[in-house]
Amino acid sequence: MTRKIIIDCDPGQDDAVALLLAFAANSELEVVGVTTVAGNVPLELTERNARLMCDIAGRDDVDVYAGCSRPLVRSLITAEKVHGRTGIDPLQIRQPSRPLKSQHAVDFIVDSLLSTEDGPITLVPTGPLTNIAMAIVKEPAILDAVDKIVLMGGAMREAGNHSPSAEFNMLVDPHAAHVVFECGTPIIAMGLDVTHQVLSTPDRIERIRALGSEAAVATADMLEFYNRHDMEKYGMHGGPLHDPCTVAWLLKPELFKSKRCNVAVETTSELTAGHTAVDFWGISGRPENAEWVYEADAAGFYDLLVEYLERYSR
Ligand code: BDR
Ligand code: CA
């Protein structure tokens, strides 16, 4: 049986790879729609980049909806320093063949969840949580139709990547993240603790490139570009691959280890905004609200990525 998902993203090379992985898994995952948010780059670029991924994957059945152009309370922070000017450097930018849907992403999420007849939908957010929080606040009844939320965001052991104590998606919209972690729906949280184990080393990128399809070569090109910043920053032999961990968890959860605990998001301190206080040892007495993913089988993850990207024809 296929699992229905909505991917809410801010492509971003790693979001783009998450889309290509999900699109390849069309017998396991039914992508009901792709929604985009401002984050790595502004909204006009994230929606265009998502539509370009639909083209590269040959998925003219998937619609893209643009959502919020800024976080709930704070000013938008973008990350061109990491992702390049387009968000998906070094890919050639062309006009996507699919038009953007006119409906706002938040309304699309609400309508899809209120009208779903054949089973619940899993939300897969890989950017700041603005659209998801807005949808929950607009119509809390949608949560009855959400199977789970499998998100990329936060950090415990790895501290922060865009401030000393916060991961980028949490830092951009901590208030939205607070709403989502408090919503009561099962959450699988893939933070930096796990994504920093899944490194795109040169040999892994070469395996992907050798598949030869447009999707595989685009993935290899994007990962090579994306790596340069993080390899220098962390001194690792490959860059961490964050967002595709969410889709990989849906396809093969046994690649990951997780523990149920409370995750709370800092919203008031300017110094530590977006910090995720992960109560891994159950010290606070606060109720468990998430599965905190803390370990990945990196070799198995790249085998899975290659196996699915192989489905694209040369
Ligand atoms: C997250 O922030 C973005 O730069 C990536 O796309 C990923 O979602 C990692 O901190
Ligand atoms: Ca992202």
Image (cartoon, rainbow, N blue to C red):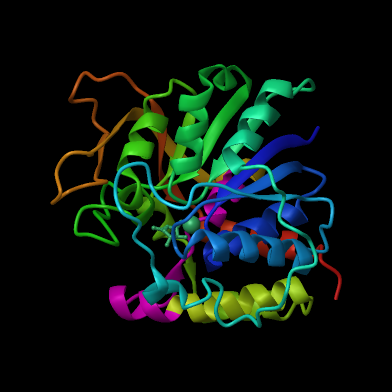
- The relative height of residue 272 versus residue 219 in the rendered view (above or below) is above
Name the residue located 76 percent from the left edge and 56 percent from the top edge: 24
Q: Is residue 240 magenta?
A: yes
Residue 127 position in % (x across, y down) = 47, 51
Name the residue located 38 percent from the left edge and 47 percent from the top edge: 71
Residue 105 position in % (x across, y down) = 60, 42
Residue 271 is left or right of residue 58, and the answer is left
Residue 8 in sight: yes
Region of the chain picked out in magenta, as a range = 228-249
Residue 211 position in % (x across, y down) = 76, 76
- The relative height of residue 8 versus residue 45 in the rendered view (above or below) is above
Give the quadrant of ligand 1.
bottom left
Q: Is residue 62 magenta?
A: no
Q: Quadrant of the C terminus?
A: bottom right
Q: Quadrant of the N terminus?
A: top right
Residue 186 in sight: no
Residue 56 position in % (x across, y down) = 76, 69
Rendering quarter of residue 204: bottom right
In front of the other: 9 or 217: 9
